[in-house]
Amino acid sequence: MLSYENKVILAPMVRIGTLPMRILALRYGADIVYSEELIDWKFLRSKRRYNDILNTVDFVDQTDGTIVFRTCLEEKEKVVLQLGTCSAERALKVAKLLENDVAAIDINMGCPKEFSIKGGMGVALLQNSDKACQILKTLVNNLSIPVTCKIRIFETPEKTLEVVKKLVNTGISAIAIHGRTKDERPQHFVHTDIIKYVAERISIPVIANGGSKEIEKYADILKFKEMSGCTSVMLARAAEWNCSIFRKDGMLPMDTVIKEYLKLAVDYDNSPSNTKYCIQNILRELQETPRGRKFLECQTLEQICAIWDLDSYCQEKQSEYQKNGIQGRWQVSPDDLEPPNKKLKVEEINLDGVIKMKVCFIRASFNDTNLPKSQLHTWAGKNGFDLPSYKTHQIEKLFCSVLTFNGQKYTSTFWEKNKKFAEQGAALVALFHLKVIREEDLINYGSIIK
């Protein structure tokens, strides 16, 4: 059973707390790692799948094939799934799906973002403590793993303690307290005095959060722990900037951290967009350097890896995964998904006589004047042909477009997430077969995998 006593913890961070960063934090010395906040309904439309190529457990969204949550054996006893919810019933359904794959469940009651508040989640739950307590009590009474919550302070120590005591009475195993109010942001002072006031008056472990502004090395973690009077400390931005903050032996250079993170991103087939986002938050102002600007132009995992001389490592791993038949975003097809009320099947779309090629459209590879559709229209005009027409098919949240041009039909077998991208993908196929663009161009765009 997971213990929250005397721990240093990776905080839940949107888009940061995916599997590669969690594993890196554990290897650097974190005792517990939290997932990013994941909303309950995303799990309720997902299916659990064991990935025997990556040796991971994946929860796959059955409407578009994206990975909602990926975990592995290395973190099983130390990963806490943070759930965004406003419903005890939904929270329990999701927790039951995850109960055997994570060490604990945490309910987010601290997010001040508009999305969470409008949905009755995050700090909105602190304004409705009865509902918050109902959610926690339902989970505590029905799960075999620990249940916790993460909150923000109120304006006074007394009000904060009043609400915390209600939450503690539900039977939760620990509580994380961010030392700012719902209206305060990172630039505001963290109120360690309020965290300490609460920690001294309740019986379960309190995890102090919000001190990244003052934490620049491992010793600062211990100072923050002492100031807040807590048993444990949770790090967000300090870990986001340099995950080796968890190392007792001292922090590592930024490039070392990025390389080690990138290897994990490749190993676990992390999405290029998520990988890029995490590295952007490590580079911060260095994105404006020549190397930083070159990095910002990258669209594929291989291109990102090349900046840090890991392109060969990436190529070898991706080639190995492809040969072994990995089921990633590149392989997603509606026929492989099982969403509720699925109506149309791929075989019902007539592709007889259609030139097919697996090409994805990456918007950032093009400006507004050289989009594939624009290139094809220009080429048609110069050569005296009628403009192409498009017929787009939608199955759940996936789109496939068939382009008709000069008596021939073209389509990409890569299912896009919107109609416009599907049309651009079909245009890329036509441009390639018309010899307007080369295979090398498609590779550079990140549109095909070789």
Image (spheres, grey):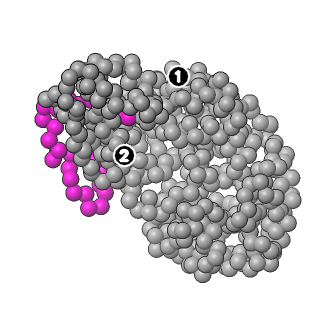
Q: Is residue 198 visible?
A: yes
Q: Is residue 244 left or right of residue 125?
A: right
Where residue 334 appears, x then y in whole percent?
28, 47
Residue 336 position, x and y percent, is 28, 47
Q: Is residue 257 visible?
A: no
Q: Mark 1 — residue?
A: 311
Please tell me whether residue 131 is drawn above or below residue 99 in the rendered image. Answer: below
Distance (Cα) linking label 1 and label 2: 27 Å
Quadrant in the picture for residue 327: top left
Highlighted magenta segment, given as a residue range:
334-361
Q: Nearer the viewer, mark 1 or mark 2?
A: 2
Taking depth in this image into account, of 33 and 372 the one nearest to the observer is: 372
**Which of the two discs, 1 and 2, labels the residue nearer the N terminus?**
1
The picture places residue 365, in percent across and down from the top left corner, at 45, 30
Find residue 146 and report its horizontal and vertical position in percent: 60, 65
**Eyeballing the image, is 342 above or below 70?**
below
The image quarter containing residue 427 is: top left
Q: Residue at x 61, y 28 (%)?
A: 293
What's under tag 2, amino acid-wise?
Answer: Lys
Q: Which mark is residue 417?
A: 2
Q: Foreground residue, 106 or 123?
A: 123
Residue 338 is inside the magenta segment? yes
